[in-house]
Amino acid sequence: MPARTAPEAPLRRDNPADEPDRTDDLTEPGPADHDAVGTLQGPRGRESRESRGADARALTQVLFKEFASLEPGTPEHARVRAALIEANLPLVRYAAARFRSRNEPMEDVVQVGTIGLINAIDRFDPDRGVQFPTFAMPTVVGEIKRYFRDNVRTVHVPRRLHELWVQVNGATEDLTVLHGRSPTTAEIADRLKIPEDEVLACIEAGRSYHATSLEAAQEGDGLPGLLDRLGYEDPALAGVEHRDLVRHLLVQLPEREQRILLLRYYSNLTQSQISAELGVSQMHVSRLLSRSFARLRSANRIDA
């Protein structure tokens, strides 16, 4: 759920089947914006949507006239404000449909968009001669984009790629409608006059919203997580802690004892060869080795 919740917003669960198929331009809502939740077919469906959209706009105008005459903080003011939110929720769902490809729960996106709707209602001045949907849409879309920017992305991509991804996404939609199929990378690159490598980078950046756990099961194929399929047991992993401990303990020994240990266990010299190297007796080398082992065992924090 998003970090904030919309105050006084009578939110309802959206039906995915009630979302529009495509939203190209949200800055200038069409005549059926207030009922974009319904995708009816045929002339009767279009007339029904247009009729309900006109009714919603007429109701919004009436409510704003009443809203402007009421004292903020009064129960009547709160009632009219809630009615305005309820009447314009289809506008929020229309804007939220643009972000269906982000793999974010639509309920969360609608709720965030409703926060923008409430802000637009509180700032709208009907005397300026601007239709409320035209005024509110940039605020609603801006609130949703801010939510995706600040709360959704766990993998941050360069701003240039993020901005270019918006253009790639728009070109993909246009070419899909034009050709009746998904466009190729070359077609998108030719449309935007950019190299194909940048198109591929933008597509990859557009997918980078969440970091998936390596232990998460793969959706759809029923296979174990990526870690189980690609990972392996490193045979040297068990010795990492011991090597670090030995390195820490060796520096605590006298320099001559350090050299004897290195000659014995790193250079693989015998005690006789070490005694000849250092000019001491083999018995003395043996005593120094025993004393070094005793010191190392007493300082071994693992055994302790």
Image (tube, rainbow, N blue to C red):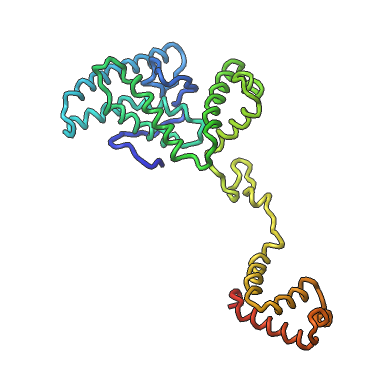
Residue 223 pos. (x, y %): 64, 46
Residue 86 in the figure: left or right of residue 36: left
Q: Quadrant of residue 59?
A: top left
Residue 253 pos. (x, y %): 65, 78
Residue 286 in the figure: left or right of residue 116: right
Q: Nearer the viewer, residue 227 or 18?
A: 227
254 versus 148 height, above or below = below
241 versus 61 height, above or below = below
Q: Quadrant of residue 115?
A: top left
The residue at 55%/44% (across/down) is: 211
Residue 159 pos. (x, y %): 52, 33
Q: State the quadrant of the C terminus.
A: bottom right
In the rendered picture of this protein, how many numbered marks are placed on residues? 0
Residue 83 in the figure: left or right of residue 70: right
Q: Nearer the viewer, residue 209 or 226?
A: 209
Q: Nearer the viewer, residue 51 or 105?
A: 105
The residue at 33%/21% (across/down) is: 135
Q: Quadrant of residue 37?
A: top left
The residue at 38%/34% (across/down) is: 112
Residue 201 pos. (x, y %): 61, 32
274 versus 232 height, above or below = below
Q: State the quadrant of the N terminus.
A: top left
236 versus 169 height, above or below = below
Q: Residue furthest top?
A: 43
Q: Nearer the viewer, residue 42 or 297?
A: 297
